[in-house]
Image (spheres, rainbow, N blue to C red):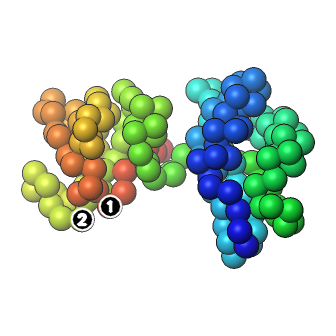
């Protein structure tokens, strides 16, 4: 099914997200299920009421944008989820100062896994404070970076 670029959908919906008090983190199209999923975030977290409010706010404007050129699709609104992998600079900026875990394709500083406080994301490099040391890990060497979930 033909659809508009997700960057166009994100740009179009960003002001509506701001008006409803959330950030549109990402729009994802699934060709298999003909589903448009809008991932939203805000500092205090996302609950079902917030998802519903955002969903209702974007329904009519999305009809006007017509992201699928008239073809039917399912619209989902969701939180990012605690364990969502970081995909780019926006994700790193959103979680600056928080504890993260970094999984690597090959050992770096003697290990394929590091956890610590995210200090910066500079020119494609994850800057992590771990045990009083600063690690500078190239993002392209990471297989997965996400929030550290402590139980």
Which mark, residue 19? none
Q: Is residue 32 left or right of residue 134?
A: right
Asked whether residue 95 appears in the rendered view, the answer is no
Residue 49 lies, in percent from the top left, at 82, 36
The quadrant in which the N terminus is found is: bottom right
- Judged from the image, the secondary structure of the residue bearing numbered disc 1 is strand
Question: Closer to the N terminus: mark 1 or mark 2?
Answer: 2
Q: Is residue 30 left or right of residue 128?
A: right
**Residue on which the image places disc 1:** 143
Residue at 79% in and 37% down: 54
The residue depicted at 87 percent of the width and 48 percent of the height is 63
Locate residue 143, reporting x and y percent. Answer: 32, 61
Q: Does 94 appear above or below 66?
A: above
Residue 134, picture quadrant: top left
- Residue at label 2? 105
Q: Residues within 10 Å of mark 1 (few under 14, many from 20)?
A: some
Residue 96 seen in the figure: yes
Residue sticking out furthest to the left: 110
Q: Residue at x 74, y 48 (%)?
A: 77
Quarter of image, res 79: top right
In the displayed structure, does residue 110 sit left or right of residue 144? left
Q: Are marks 1 and 2 in contact (CB under 8 Å)?
A: yes
Judging depth in this view, the residue of 97 and 77 nearest the camera is 77
Give me the residue at 36% from left, 42% from top: 100
């Amino acid at each position: 099914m033909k659809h508009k670029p997700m960057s166009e959908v994100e740009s179009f919906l960003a002001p509506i997200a701001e008006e409803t008090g959330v950030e549109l983190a990402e729009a994802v199209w699934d060709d298999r299920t003909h589903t448009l999923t809008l991932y939203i975030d805000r500092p205090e977290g996302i609950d079902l009421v917030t998802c519903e409010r955002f969903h209702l706010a974007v329904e009519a404007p999305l009809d006007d944008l017509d992201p699928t050129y008239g073809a039917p699709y399912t619209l989902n609104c969701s939180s990012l989820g605690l364990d969502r992998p970081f995909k780019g600079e926006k994700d790193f900026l959103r979680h600056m100062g928080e504890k993260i875990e970094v999984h690597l394709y090959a050992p770096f500083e003697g290990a394929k896994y590091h956890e610590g406080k995210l200090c910066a994301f500079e020119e494609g490099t994850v800057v992590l404070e771990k045990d009083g040391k600063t690690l500078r890990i190239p993002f392209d060497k990471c297989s997965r970076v996400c929030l550290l979930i402590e139980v």
